[in-house]
Amino acid sequence: MIYDHLLIRYGELSLKGGNQKLFIRQLQQNIREKLKSFENISLKRTQGRMFIVLNGHEAMPVVHKLQEVFGIHSMSLALRTDNDEASIKAGALFALKNCEKGATFKVAVRRANKQFPIGSQEMNHILGAHLLRNTEGFTVDVHEPDVEIQVEIRHEGTYIMSEVIPGLGGFPVGTGSRTLLLLSGGIDSPVAGYLMMKRGVTVEAIHFASPPFTSERAKQKVIDLAKQLTRYGKRLKVHFVPFTNLQQAIHQHIPDRYAMTVMRRMMLRIAEAVCEQSNILSITTGESLGQVASQTMESMNVINEVTNVPVIRPLVTMDKQEIIEISREINTYDISIRPYEDCCTIFNPKSPKTKPKREPTKRIESAYDFSEKIAESIAGIEVIEYTENETIDSFEHLL
């Protein structure tokens, strides 16, 4: 006997009511995309369940891929048997003996096929007694067992499982519209993008580059972060903004204390233009309240003033250590800490204004006409699309 199926559990998707079919269809599509390198594997749905038919493939490489798919609450390796008592007993015994650890167990039978002649409770007792007779060192604990042997008797066969493998949860990417992520190359913004994907949102990114002050290695860091995020979101477009001339103008014409605030306002203006051109509904940032000068409540109020596009901050209440822990889990941390500066740090003022107000900021900003520099940056945007396995150059420019 071998485990020949993987049972997929939806978790939060079951709460979606009339929209559930849409979410499950998107999950199916995302799973197929993720597993396309595994030949002969098939996906099927039956009576509120989704199964991966392994067709001889090793299970764990498939499991590891599926643990990068949002919308999967958990998985279990499953053995399919015929719907007869002897086959089910043999399958349950196989499942228990192949558990790596545990001294207590319980059996949980679910009889979806009501034509099966033995009821669920009676089948629990039959299988429990069979397992006790044919194993050593196991006892029954119906309240807190080390191992739960799950048996689902369905019309097409019986599925027997023991271990529950956690998934990422959330919603399938592609069910929640699109957002534009300000991807700086630091620790925070990739985590913000990951958390948006977890809510089903398709993420595009925008990166502000200031060569020669920022190097090609800094750009490569952003590319590597984008590619890492495609593990969870299939593909990711990055809008690379030539920001040098605009940033130099800010540095030359804006008092040092207000330079960071004005720079962030310029970034949001450009991000809004990209959203309008690409029909993207929101902007996402990696800001955490109070973490740096531009992330105080006062700074956020002044910076947000320049756009009507909703600005979403998934990390706003998180401690830095919480953010770092997630970045390690999703393997972006080691990329983010590479020592290559982005445009937010190269002209970083010594004493930035931490509690700016709108009217003084607007007055200072209006002393110089930045419109030509903004238009120049927008016109020079280069868009490159990345997938998990390849790079697609599109070289689009906004006009």
Image (cartoon, rainbow, N blue to C red):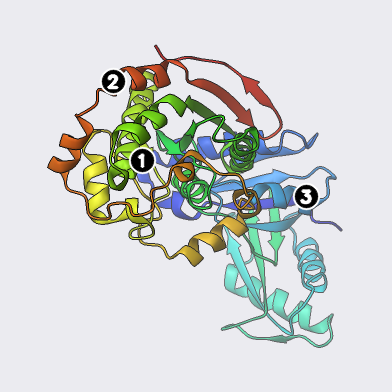
Of the residues under marks 3 and 2, which one precedes in the sequence? 3
Would you call the spot at circle 3 few (<14 residues within 10 Å), some (14-19), or many (20 or more)?
Answer: few
Q: Name the amino acid, label 2.
A: Ser
Residue 74 seen by the camera: no
| Residue 222 image-quadrant placement | top right
Q: CA distance from mark 1 to mark 3?
A: 34 Å
Closer to the camera, 312 or 159? 312
Q: Are marks 1 and 3 in contact (CB under 8 Å)?
A: no
Left or right of residue 142: residue 133: right
Which percent across, then down, holds residue 84?
Answer: 75, 59
The label shown at residue 61 is 3
Left or right of residue 294: residue 112: right
- Residue ID for mark 2: 371
Q: Name the amino acid, label 3.
A: Pro
**Residue, x 80% and y 35% (percent of image)?**
40
Q: Are marks 3 and 2 in contact (CB under 8 Å)?
A: no
The label shown at residue 18 is 1
Q: Secondary structure at mark 2?
A: helix
Of the residues under marks 1 and 2, which one precedes in the sequence? 1
Q: Secondary structure at mark 1?
A: helix
Q: Name the amino acid, label 1.
A: Gly
Q: CA distance from mark 1 to mark 2?
A: 47 Å
